[in-house]
């Protein structure tokens, strides 16, 4: 390798190393940036929430969002609740309550079974369902009779 080629190679290697270090330093902030995205960036219209739904949003964020995504948009761990399959005619409020209390076997998606969520109180579950329903309503998901 000539002196010029060796110098160029070392320079390229140094630039690559600096770029990797910069990316590694920024890595923890990527998750924060995603969490800070407004609902509109995720394709969600955010309504003015009732007091019960606002409490439900806090409980959802603390207990459900890690699998069902911010604003119920889904993740690699759980399905999106902002999907028409979860309209009240197909999944009544009671279905949400039972799923959280007892767990539920995989049936619409391939995320595996949902385990029970014993850390969530009955009051929080009602608030979470209110939040999901108000969010669904604002995003065009409405009651449709279920047909088999």
Image (spheres, rainbow, N blue to C red):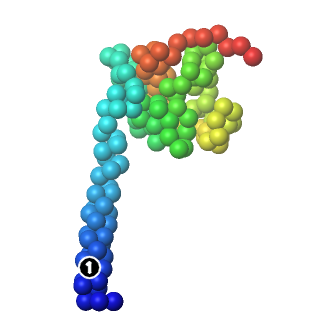
Measuring from the top left, give residue 14's x and y in whole percent. Answer: 26, 75
147 sits to left or right of 14? right
Above or below for 125 versus 5: above
- Tell me the quadrant of the picture where the C terminus can be found: top right
Measuring from the top left, give residue 112's x and y in whole percent. Answer: 65, 42
Residue at the image point whose x is 44% and y is 18% from the top:
139
Classify 10 Å Cα crowding around label 1: few (below 14), some (14-19), many (20 and above).
few
Q: Residue furthest bottom?
A: 2
Residue at the image point whose x is 51% and y is 16% from the top:
141
- Tell me the quadrant of the picture where the N terminus can be found: bottom left
Measuring from the top left, give residue 65's x and y in whole percent. Answer: 45, 37
Residue 84 seen in the figure: yes
Residue at the image point whose x is 61% and y is 39% from the top:
114
SS category of the residue bearing label 1: helix
Residue 130 seen in the figure: no
Measuring from the top left, give residue 106's x and y in whole percent. Answer: 67, 37
User: Relative to the observer, which residue lies in front, 138 or 40?
Assistant: 40
Above or below for 143 versus 94: above
Q: How many marks?
A: 1
Among the 4 quarters of the image, the one containing residue 102: top right
- Label 1, on which residue? 8
58 sits to left or right of 85? left
């Amino acid at each position: 390798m000539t002196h010029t080629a060796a110098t160029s190679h070392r320079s390229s290697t140094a630039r690559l190393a600096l770029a990797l270090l910069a990316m590694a330093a920024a890595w923890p902030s990527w998750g924060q940036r995603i969490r800070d995205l407004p609902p509109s960036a995720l394709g969600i219209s955010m309504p003015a929430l009732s007091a019960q739904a606002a409490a439900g949003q806090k409980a959802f964020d603390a207990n459900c969002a890690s699998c069902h995504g911010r604003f119920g948009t889904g993740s690699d761990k759980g399905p999106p609740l902002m999907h028409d399959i979860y309209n009240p005619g197909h999944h009544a409020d009671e279905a949400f309550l039972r799923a959280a209390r007892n767990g539920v076997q995989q049936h619409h998606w391939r995320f595996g079974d949902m385990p029970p969520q014993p850390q969530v109180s009955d009051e929080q579950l009602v608030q979470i369902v209110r939040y999901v329903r108000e969010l669904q309503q604002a995003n065009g998901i409405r009651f449709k009779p279920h047909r088999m």
